[in-house]
Amino acid sequence: MAGHRAADRSRGGGRGRHRHGPDDAVQVTSESIHAGGHVIALANVAYVWHARGATTLAVRGRVLGRGVLVVLLSLPPLVALVCVVPQVTFEGVR
């Protein structure tokens, strides 16, 4: 189970059978996790974490796309604050 760890806790799981990892070494069913010759009941799993691998180009593209989206959505309110609000404030003072 290199890179994968689990801790005990009473809790159910999802449905179906899913395989994780490049060599399908980890299999998750609705009742258990099969990894490295070990079987862990999902009812006994509290949390699972993994070691982070190398970032792919697709992931970097999604992160960059989200950043661009945030900037584009933030520009109109910032422009309004810089251009419109000072004019309204100064015209009201006169």
Image (cartoon, helix red, strand yellow):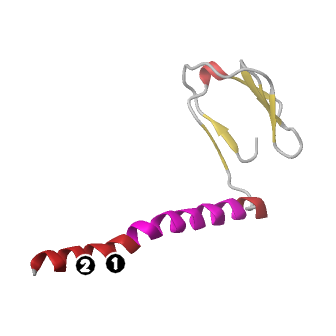
Looking at the figure, which quarter contains the C terminus?
Answer: bottom left
Looking at the figure, which quarter contains the N terminus?
Answer: top right
Residue named by callout 2: 87
Q: Nearer the viewer, residue 76 or 54?
A: 76
Where residue 13 sits, quadrant-wise, is: top right
The magenta stretch is: 60-78
Residue 75's place in the image compared with 35, above or below, is below
Q: Farthest residue to the left: give it.
A: 94
Residue 17's place in the image compared with 84, above or below, is above
Question: What amino acid is found at the position of numbered circle 1 in the picture?
Answer: Cys
SS at mark 2 in the image: helix
In the picture provided, is 80 more to the left or to the right than 55?
Answer: left
The residue at the point 68 percent across, 59 percent down is 62
- Badge 2 local density, few (<14 within 10 Å), some, or many (20+)? few
Residue 90's place in the image compared with 73, above or below, is below
Q: Nearer the viewer, residue 87 or 51?
A: 87
Residue 5 within the magenta-colored segment of the rendering: no
Contact (Cβ within 8 Å) of mark 2 with mark 1: yes
Residue named by callout 1: 83
Q: CA distance from mark 2 to mark 1?
A: 7 Å
The residue at the point 71 percent across, 18 percent down is 31
The prevailing secondary structure element of the residues shown in magenta is helix
Question: What amino acid is found at the position of numbered circle 2 in the picture?
Answer: Gln
Count numbered badges in the picture: 2
